[in-house]
Image (cartoon, rainbow, N blue to C red):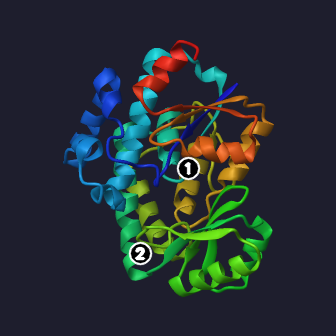
């Protein structure tokens, strides 16, 4: 049984998707659809644009989603894996929208519309409620959880893997947590280049507005493949459940490690990672070094695996 994983924000780079578009017509069609929905040349931005543009949330999020799906379409054109062979899909934060496309919950253009609006609302919330994020390396989850609980305005945001947790919140609170974490034995702390305190209660207003947009804009379908949700690391088989959690995801921590452990416990023995970078493969090495993850990012990834390499 296999699992499909989709990359999220932070994996982007200039040049992503370029050789997929050149080698696979289906991937190029994905970019053409994105250009039509977004109203600008996303392919140019991804392939040879300004790196600073890809740091902007309202451009980065649609771009990563598009590359995720471009990689998935290239994969489908060369591999014949039945839905019955896929146990679960999951995506890291933004990547959850690509997972929903793969599971048949959303059409790609609708996912783009949602992601674009999500990014806009998150940016607006970040302006109204300024904050920041930082990665804490080498500290036990419970220790960091207790530090955040005793520091008003600081929250766990991304529980990626053992020893790598992202915190989010007010800058003063995050600075306090960083200092306390180092005192408690963290190996290092890394400030993240983000425009706001994502996956924290500071995004509550964005979630409220997003719920209204989601209700008025898109109809979700029940998934053909169960989605393991970021919010609770449990499988969702109903559109209503997924809809509720897409709203919660904006202000809730991303339980990635828990999600992967759930999939592993259900007997998933091979994972395909779609999209830019190989971040999810790296995280899995720390969650379960024995798990097999095949990254589908470039033409060579597909050709190598077709040949059994």
Whether residue 209 is visible here, answered yes or no, is yes
**Looking at the picture, how far across and down is residue 304, in whole percent?**
51, 19
Disc 2 versus disc 1: distance between alpha carbons? 20 Å
> Measuring 40% from the left and 59% from the top, which residue is drawn there?
118
Whether residue 233 is visible here, answered yes or no, is no
Please give the residue where the numbered disc 1 appears in the rendered image.
92
Position of residue 68 relative to residue 231, above or below, is above
Looking at the image, residue 303 sits to the left or right of residue 28; the answer is right
> Measuring 57% from the left and 56% from the top, which residue is drawn there?
244
Q: Secondary structure at mark 1?
A: loop
Looking at the image, residue 209 sits to the left or right of residue 237; the answer is left
Pointer 2 local density, CA inside 10 Å: few below 14, some 14–19, many at least 20 = many
User: Circles 2 and 1: CB distance less than 8 Å?
Assistant: no
Viewer-closest of 64 and 237: 64
Please give the residue where the numbered disc 2 appears in the rendered image.
126
Q: For the C terminus, which image quadrant?
A: top right
> Measuring 24% from the left and 34% from the top, which residue is drawn there?
32
**Looking at the picture, how far across and down is residue 129, in whole percent?**
44, 81
Pointer 1 local density, CA inside 10 Å: few below 14, some 14–19, many at least 20 = many
Which quadrant holds residue 53? bottom left
Position of residue 178 relative to residue 70, above or below, is below
Viewer-closest of 216 and 110: 110
**Looking at the picture, how far across and down is residue 282, in whole percent?**
62, 45
Q: Which disc number belongs to residue 109?
A: none
Which quadrant holds residue 280? top right
- Closer to the chain start, of discs 2 and 1, is 1
Q: Secondary structure at mark 2?
A: helix
Looking at the image, residue 110 sits to the left or right of residue 170; the answer is left
């Amino acid at each position: 049984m296999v699992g499909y994983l989709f990359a999220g924000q932070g994996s982007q780079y200039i040049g992503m998707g370029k050789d997929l578009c050149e080698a696979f017509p289906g991937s190029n069609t994905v970019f053409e659809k994105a250009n039509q929905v977004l109203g600008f040349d996303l392919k140019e931005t991804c392939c040879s644009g300004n790196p600073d543009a890809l740091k902007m949330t309202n451009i980065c999020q649609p771009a990563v989603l598009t590359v995720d799906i471009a990689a998935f379409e290239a994969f489908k054109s060369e591999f014949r894996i039945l839905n019955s062979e896929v146990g679960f899909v999951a995506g890291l934060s933004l990547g959850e929208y690509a997972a929903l496309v793969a599971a048949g919950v959303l059409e790609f253009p609708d996912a783009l519309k949602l992601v674009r609006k999500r990014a806009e609302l998150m940016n607006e919330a970040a302006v109204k409620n300024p904050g920041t994020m930082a990665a804490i390396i080498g500290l036990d989850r419970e220790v960091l959880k207790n530090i955040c609980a005793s520091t008003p305005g600081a929250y766990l945001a991304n529980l990626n893997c053992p020893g790598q947790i992202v915190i989010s919140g007010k800058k003063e609170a995050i600075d306090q947590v960083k200092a306390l974490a180092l005192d408690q034995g963290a190996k290092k702390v890394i400030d993240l280049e983000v425009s706001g305190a994502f996956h924290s209660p500071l995004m509550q207003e964005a979630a409220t507005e997003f719920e209204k947009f989601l209700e008025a804009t898109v109809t979700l379908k029940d998934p053909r493949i169960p989605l393991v949700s970021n919010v609770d690391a449990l499988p969702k088989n109903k559109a209503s459940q997924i809809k509720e959690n897409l709203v919660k995801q904006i202000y809730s921590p991303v339980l990635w490690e828990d999600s992967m452990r759930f999939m592993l416990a259900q007997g998933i023995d091979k994972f395909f990672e779609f999209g830019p970078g190989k971040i999810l493969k790296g995280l899995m090495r720390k969650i379960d070094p024995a798990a097999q993850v095949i990254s589908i990012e470039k033409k060579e990834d597909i050709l190598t695996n077709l040949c059994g390499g």
